[in-house]
Amino acid sequence: MRRRTFIPLLISAALGLSGCKVGNMTSSHGQADQAYIYLASNRAYKDMAQVVIDNQTRFDAKVNKEKKHQVKGETYAVATGKRHIKVLYHNQVVYERTVFLAAQETHQIMLP
């Protein structure tokens, strides 16, 4: 009689414990294929600056006041690779340069 109750109890305990997740699960993800740009300046820019990338993509961007090597403020995602970046403020070119942007890199653009 004792054996009849012990075997089902042992089987149910084994099934109950085998359903538990044991151990560490690892996963790997590739880096997103994009870079970021960050506009900074020593002086305050009241209006938004216009950023032109490769003479095709245009968007308005906020110019952040520079703070001791910390990226705080707006960053903008752009495609990786060799990019020609032009920044206009009140229709005047204040920055124009060709740069290489790597994946997950944040490129700081210092404006005058």
Image: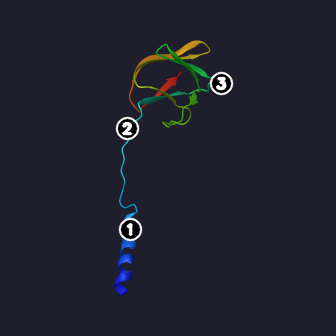
Q: Tell me the distance, in whole angstroms, between the alpha carbons under discs 2 and 1.
A: 37 Å
Q: Nearer the viewer, residue 30 or 72?
A: 30
Q: Quadrant of residue 19?
A: bottom left
Q: How is the image coloured?
A: rainbow
Q: Which residue is mark 3?
A: 46
Q: Say which quadrant the C terminus sits in.
A: top right
Q: Tell me the distance, in whole angstroms, between the alpha carbons under discs 2 and 3.
A: 38 Å
Disc 1 versus disc 3: nearer the observer: 1
Q: Tell me the distance, in whole angstroms, between the alpha carbons under discs 1 and 3.
A: 67 Å
Q: Say which quadrant the N terminus sits in.
A: bottom left
Residue 95 versus residue 37 in the image, above or below: above
Q: Nearer the viewer, residue 89 or 55?
A: 55
Q: Indicate the position of residue 110 as horizontal and vertical percent values.
A: 50, 25
Q: Indicate the position of residue 74 as horizontal and vertical percent values.
A: 56, 32
Q: Which residue is mark 1?
A: 15
Which residue is rendered at x = 35% and y = 60% of the image? 23
Q: Which mark is residue 49?
A: none
Which residue is rendered at x = 37% and y = 53% of the image? 25
Residue 18 versus residue 66 in the image, above or below: below
Q: Quadrant of residue 83?
A: top left
Residue contact between numbered discs 1 and 3, judged by CB atoms under 8 Å: no
Amino acid carrying mark 1 in the image: Leu
SS class, disc 2: loop
How many neighbours does mark 1 have within 10 angstroms: few (below 14), some (14-19), or many (20 or more)? few
How many neighbours does mark 2 have within 10 angstroms: few (below 14), some (14-19), or many (20 or more)? few
Amino acid carrying mark 2 in the image: Gly
Residue contact between numbered discs 2 and 1, judged by CB atoms under 8 Å: no
Q: Which mark is residue 30?
A: 2
Question: Given the current orientation, which residue lies at the most extreme right position?
Answer: 46
